[in-house]
């Protein structure tokens, strides 16, 4: 019996040692990437950084004309808006930024990643850039941020483009307390295989074959910016959607709704519900994209940006709109 117990002890100890070695190897393979390395790889000549209340915000400010602000989705970055910026900047001033815990912005030294803090940083950035009134475009989490910004700053919003706002997702909608994150999720702080962003991207596309390897590589790289993964886990832990229906009802700007018909995260039926909840919006237009999933700006950048451009050309940037409601559904 003593020999059996000794053998079991050696076996358990050996397995534990192997697990420790495997963990150490994985953390080395998927270690953090220094900011200067990623900035050399993904910053552009238009990239700028603003130090705002303990956060370092990466942004790009391009073009001239009425301002349009682009807000990316959760886990994404401002780079995903490249096709939109190209489609708009000949006639519009296009401002986009990386939220903290995303892109090249990285961690917020305050440790606060809640929605009110995110909107506050956006307000301060636009103040610094002298953007007094703009059209605000947001996709997924960015759509939720756009709604909250519009409610807090009605006089500063000429119009809203909402691309499947994430706060309408059944799993988070109406949440008044932070979600429960599995302790196993903490492993993502150290072990983040490339297969994870690839899985998320393919799940967000209507046609997974359209997910380019370069897109997966960029997401994987930027997730590993030093301090980014811990910051993003905190953002997930702090996410409270709140009474989103009441907030949507307070929007007083013209709205364009864009939605992928094959959206598995925030199903297409919610586009009509969003339009119904926009009881104070002076005009609403809805465009549905057949075959497109949740990540519409990644999967259908030309179509979504062209439609947004057409709509923006009719937005009254100089003053509040009092036009009658317009509703359009495209199959």
Image: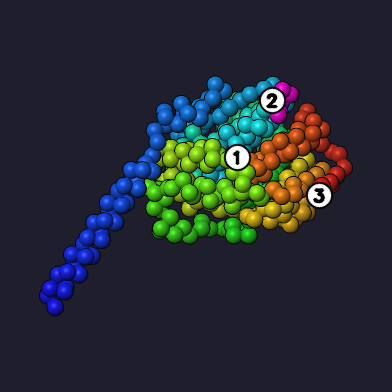
Q: Is residue 106 visible?
A: yes
Residue 40 in picture, x, y percent from top left: 46, 26
Viewer-closest of 60 and 30: 30
Quadrant in which residue 299 is drawn: top right
The residue lying at 53 percent from left, 51 percent from top is 199
Residue 134 in picture, x, y percent from top left: 70, 31
| 238 falls in the magenta region | no
Cα separation, mark 1 vs mark 3, equals 25 Å
**Which SS class for mark 1?**
loop
The residue lying at 45 percent from left, 49 percent from top is 233
Cα separation, mark 3 vs mark 2, equals 28 Å
User: Which stretch is magenta?
Assistant: 87-93
Residue 293 in picture, x, y percent from top left: 66, 49
Cα separation, mark 2 vs mark 1, equals 17 Å
Instruction: Specify few, some or many for label 2: CA neighbours under 10 Å numbering under 14, 14-19, or 20 or more.
Output: some
Q: Which mark is residue 10?
A: none
Q: Name the N-terminal-most of marks 1 and 3.
A: 1
Answer with left or right where residue 86 lies relative to residue 224.
Answer: right
Residue 212 in picture, x, y percent from top left: 58, 40
Q: Which mark is residue 331?
A: 3
**Which SS class for mark 2?**
loop
The mark closer to the camera, 1 or 3, is 3
Name above or below for residue 301 compared with residue 200.
above
């Amino acid at each position: 019996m003593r020999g059996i117990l000794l053998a079991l002890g050696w076996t358990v100890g050996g397995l534990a040692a192997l697990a420790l070695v495997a963990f150490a190897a994985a953390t080395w393979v998927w270690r953090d990437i220094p900011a200067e390395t990623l900035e050399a790889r993904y910053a552009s000549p238009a990239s700028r950084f603003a130090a705002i209340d303990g956060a370092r915000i990466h942004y790009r400010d391009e073009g001239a004309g009425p301002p349009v602000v682009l807000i990316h989705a959760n886990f994404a970055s401002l780079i995903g808006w490249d096709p939109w910026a190209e489609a708009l900047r000949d006639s519009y001033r296009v401002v986009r930024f990386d939220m903290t815990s995303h892109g090249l912005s990285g961690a917020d030294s305050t440790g606060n990643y809640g929605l009110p803090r995110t909107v506050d940083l956006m307000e301060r950035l636009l103040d610094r850039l002298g953007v007094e009134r703009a059209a605000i475009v947001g996709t997924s989490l960015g759509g939720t941020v756009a709604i909250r910004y519009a409610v807090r700053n009605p006089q500063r919003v000429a119009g809203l483009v909402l691309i499947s706002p994430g706060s309408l997702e059944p799993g988070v909608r109406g949440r008044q307390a932070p979600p429960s994150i599995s302790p196993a999720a903490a492993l993502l702080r150290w072990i983040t295989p490339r297969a994870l962003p690839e899985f998320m991207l393919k799940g967000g596309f209507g046609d997974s074959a359209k997910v380019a390897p370069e897109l997966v590589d960029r997401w994987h790289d930027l997730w590993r910016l030093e301090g980014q993964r811990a910051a993003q886990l905190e953002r997930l832990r702090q996410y409270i959607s709140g009474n989103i229906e009441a907030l949507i009802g307070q929007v007083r700007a013209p709205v364009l709704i864009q939605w992928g018909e094959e959206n598995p995260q925030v199903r297409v039926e919610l586009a009509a519900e969003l339009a119904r909840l926009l009881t104070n919006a002076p005009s609403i237009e809805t465009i549905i994209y057949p075959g497109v999933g949740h990540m519409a700006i990644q999967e259908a950048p030309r179509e979504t940006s062209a439609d947004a451009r057409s709509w923006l050309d009719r937005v009254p940037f100089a003053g509040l709109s009092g036009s009658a409601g317009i509703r359009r559904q495209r199959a």
